[in-house]
Amino acid sequence: MVEPLKDRWRRGEVTLGAWCMIPSSLTAEILAKGGFDWVLIDMQHGCMGYETAVEMIRAIDLAGITPLVRVPWNEPGIIGRLLDAGAMGIVAPMVNAMNEAQGLVDACRYPPVGRRSLGPVRVGARDGMGYVASANDRIAVIPMIETAEALAKVDAIAAVPGVDALFVGPFDLSFSLGLRPGDNDGEPTFDAAIARINTAARSNGIATAVLSTAALAPLRAAQGFRMISVFTDSIALAAAANASLDAARVAIAEGSNNA
């Protein structure tokens, strides 16, 4: 079995991952074999449905790394289905209060510490019935802190037993704080929010996570983040396509000038 991410976070390791917006098991497989520590399937803003997400989880499994899913909403039905499909971590958006974080934990954990229903059909085929005994210890429960309301209650959210990491959504958090959507490093309000979230997490012995880029990864690691997304498939594809097209046009133009 793949070592749980939260065990690595406890040792202070920085885990780097890729973000999937494109609904494709082939894309997920290619990224999973690229050397990342984890690959996340984004069902909130990505374009995949449940059946495609299941195939993407299977493709990530084949590479021997951790499949994570950001669910569309903090709702136990879809959370349970994705865990049964093999997701080893759930990122839930817009968690704004302690009771919402508790609901996320309940949806991800089997009794007596949660309320997850027993029915690991696909993940049971992958791991056998030993999955059930170890699932509570292996699955990462990750609420997102991405609003001013969540920031105000971050200490209470971080203190909920069973929460393994706090995930910063810099775009929505900035938007909620009255800033332009995006990374606003150097802006005092944004910097203070990042520091407060990391402090709350460390005070409760849990990790922090963030949607980021390769260029910002050193800063985020220095700030204390232990789960850092450094690649997004749709953005990378668009950038590579534009760069290739520009290079081809320049080469053709130079060839015509030299003719």
Image (tube, rainbow, N blue to C red):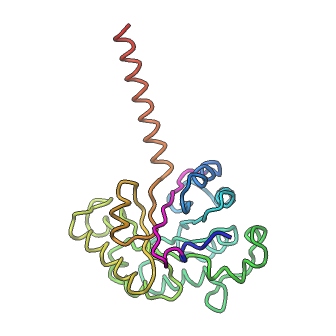
In the rendered view, tell whether residue 43 sits above or below residue 168: above
Whole-percent x, y for residue 137 in the image: 62, 82
Q: Is residue 174 left or right of residue 84?
A: left
User: In the picture shown, does residue 38 fall above or below 200?
Assistant: above
**Residue nearest the observer in this picture, 235 or 256:** 256
Magenta region: which residues?
8-23
Vertical order, 125 against 76 (above or below): above
- The quarter of the image holding the C terminus is top left
Residue at the extreme bottom: 112
User: Is 22 inside the magenta-drawn segment?
Assistant: yes
Number of callouts in the render?
Answer: 0
Residue 210 placement, left or right of 34 = left
Task: Please name the residue shown 49% across and 48% down the image.
Answer: 234
- Give the image location of residue 53, x and y in percent: 64, 59
- Residue shown at the point (44%, 70%) measured from the top left: 226
* Side of 134 relative to 19 (left or right): right
Query: Any magenta on residue 87?
Result: no
Image coords of residue 28 (percent x, y): 60, 53
Quadrant location, the N terminus: bottom right
Residue 231 x/y as whole percent: 46, 53
Quarter of the view holding residue 153? bottom left
Q: Which residue corresponds to the image point at 56% horizontal and 50% vertical from the top-left?
A: 22
- Please give left or right for residue 99 compared with residue 120 in the image: left
